[in-house]
Amino acid sequence: MADWNRGHGSVDDMLDAENKRMAENLATKVSRLKSLAYDIDREADDQNEYLDGMDSNFLSATGLLSGSVKRFSTMVRSGRDNRRLLCYVSMGLVLVFFLLYYLVSRIQR
């Protein structure tokens, strides 16, 4: 009976050591997951801050564009001379766009 207890004690020691090893392994994994969750939370906060800034920029751009459209509409509704000027400006912008497109395509080659 004494041999059985001694053998049983070594099994208990072996199981206890295995449990401690597994508990340490689990603690390491939990620590890694906690760190990962913290990183995800910080990244989400950074992305939300970035999106809020973009929202502000888009509102500013919308204000600028609406003011430009109002001025453009006023110029179109005014006399014949302004329409001719508007036509020249529009053609000039189209030419500048195609010129820039050509230059950028040449640079990328």
Image (tube, rainbow, N blue to C red):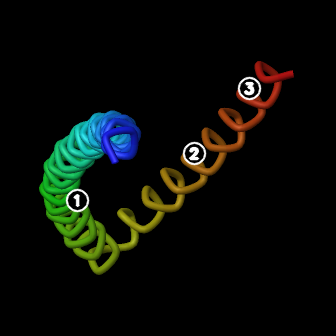
Q: Comparing marks 3 and 1, which lies closer to the viewer?
A: 1
Verify CB contact (< 8 Å) between mark 2 and mark 3: no
Q: Which residue is mark 1?
A: 58
- Asked which secondary structure carries label 1, the reply is helix
Q: Which is more toward the observer, 65 or 18?
A: 18
N-terminal of the pair, mark 2 or mark 3, is: 2
Residue type, mark 1 in image = Phe
Mark 1 Cα-neighbour bin, 10 Å: few <14, some 14–19, many ≥20? few
| Vertical order, 107 against 13 (above or below) | above
CA gap between label 3 and label 1 equals 29 Å
Q: Position of residue 20 (x, y in %)?
A: 28, 37
| Vertical order, 74 against 45 (above or below) | below
CA gap between label 2 and label 3 equals 16 Å
Q: Position of residue 2 (x, y in %)?
A: 31, 40
Q: Which residue is mark 3?
A: 103
Q: Position of residue 79 (x, y in %)?
A: 31, 74
Left or right of 103 on screen, residue 73: left
Left or right of 56 on screen, residue 93: right
Residue type, mark 2 in image = Gly
Q: Which residue is mark 2?
A: 92
Residue type, mark 3 in image = Leu
